Image (cartoon, grey):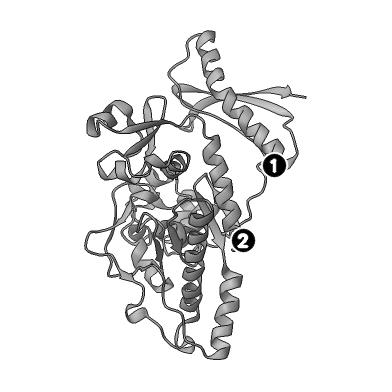
Amino acid sequence: FIGGGGALRDPSLRLKPVAICQKYIVVTSNYPARELGVGKLVRITEALKIVPDLTLVNGEDLTPYRNVSKQIYSVLSRFGVAERMGMDEVWVDVTDRCRAEADRLVRDGGESPGWVGHLHRSSVLVSASGCRVQDIRVEEGHSGDRGGGDYGNQESESVPFSDLLLRVGCRLAQEARDTVKREVGIRCSGGIAHNKILAKLVSSLHKPDQQTVLPSKEAYDFLTPLDVRVVKGVGSRTARKLTALGAKTCGELRGMKRDKLIEEFGERIGSFLHEVCRGRDADEVKETKAPKSISVEDSFRSCSSMEAVADVVRVLTPDLINLVWEDATEHARRPSTLTVKWRFRRTYSADGKRSHAVVKVGPSG
């Protein structure tokens, strides 16, 4: 997303390998750079060894990218209830529109629309090279169906209603992606499924500028080989504990009884783990509201003097001012309290969490 946003500002970068940098780290890169071996979160010096003619773009000021993100959200919110997750991901609930169209097709006895995009089947081999959603990939030679196939057009009455909803939904997704590309100039990948977690996971299977549909009956097998850490809501501590219990993948997690999970993790997390590894997620898409707080933070080398602390504040303050100004323009409000938080390097509390301190500076007027 940030690579695409940079290309909007400078179209000459679109086909060149580009790295977006903050301090001494490549925080992300565009697809031409990734194809040459430059990934995320590598040192700039290492990236330049891999691709000597890599174009470096300063990514310290995220204001232009936030503006593009708002434009994308504005477009997608026309299609249904939209919920932003971070700067470059949006969930859109199109259930009502899909159900109305599916009901019409069944009532009128019309032909079911075919699939648009990649249709994921259980025969397609999926692997995850890491613990992030973007690490999920379809193994080479297993691309799945590109629309049609024996999942192709059928009479609407003969198609399971859940699949009919997805058939309508994947056409809406294509329309939404085309609209974003036309009005904002950004290419989007998409995932279409019956809940938020599955849609997010399947969206990474075919990139860039493509979409993947996950029928309900394929969800179980799709999740089986995936590391539990790719699931939103499973943090590093929970994943480490699950691994110690012999459940590193979603398939292995299914082997644990609900009572055991609740005993180990408590009612809320235990029940969530039991359901999510089976492809079930009751979390609804919630319209993104104005944030309750605005913050900026970053990791720095150890600060051993007030001069070093002042340098850190000088780096963070401009971005915070920009965020407050944008929020005031959009929501007609101003903050009342300023909070400063710092974390002590390599020190931990009794429960294993990193030690930190928080100080409220008081009303800012």
Residue in front for this viewpoint, 183 or 135: 183
Furthest residue toward front: 12
Q: Earlier in the sequence, mark 1 or mark 2?
A: 2
**Residue appearing at x 58%, y 24% in the figure:** 318
151 with respect to 74 (left or right): left
**Residue 152, position in %: x, y?**
37, 80
Q: Residue at x 57, y 28 (%)?
A: 319
Q: Does dot 2 land on a helix, a strand or a loop?
A: loop
Name of the residue lying farthest toward the bottom: 109
Residue 285, by quadrant, is bottom right
Above or below: residue 324 compared with residue 357: below
Q: In the orientation shown, which residue stands out farthest toward the right?
A: 365
Where residue 108 is drawn, which disc sits there?
A: none
Alpha-carbon neighbours of circle 2 within 10 Å: few (<14), some, or many (≥20)? few
Residue 123 screen position, x and y as percent = 27, 70
Q: CA distance from mark 1 to mark 2?
A: 18 Å
Vertical relation: 145 (above or below) 265: below
Does residue 191 sit above or below 347 in this rendering?
A: below
Report which residue position mark 1 lands on: 330
Q: Give the position of the N terminus as an image quadrant.
A: top left
Residue 262 in percent (x, y) is at 49, 54
Screen quadrant of the C terminus:
top right
Residue 149, picture quadrant: bottom left
**Residue bearing mark 2:** 78
The residue carrying pointer 1 sits among few (fewer than 14), some (14 to 19) or many (20 or more) residues within 10 Å by Cα, namely: few
Q: Position of residue 167 (x, y in %)?
A: 46, 75
Q: Which element carries disc 1, helix, strand or loop?
A: helix
In the image: residue 285, left or right of residue 204? right
Specify the amino acid type for callout 1. Answer: Glu
Q: Tell me the amino acid under the disc marked 2.
A: Arg
Viewer-proximal residue among 299 and 96:
96
* Contact, mark 1 vs mark 2 (Cβ under 8 Å): no
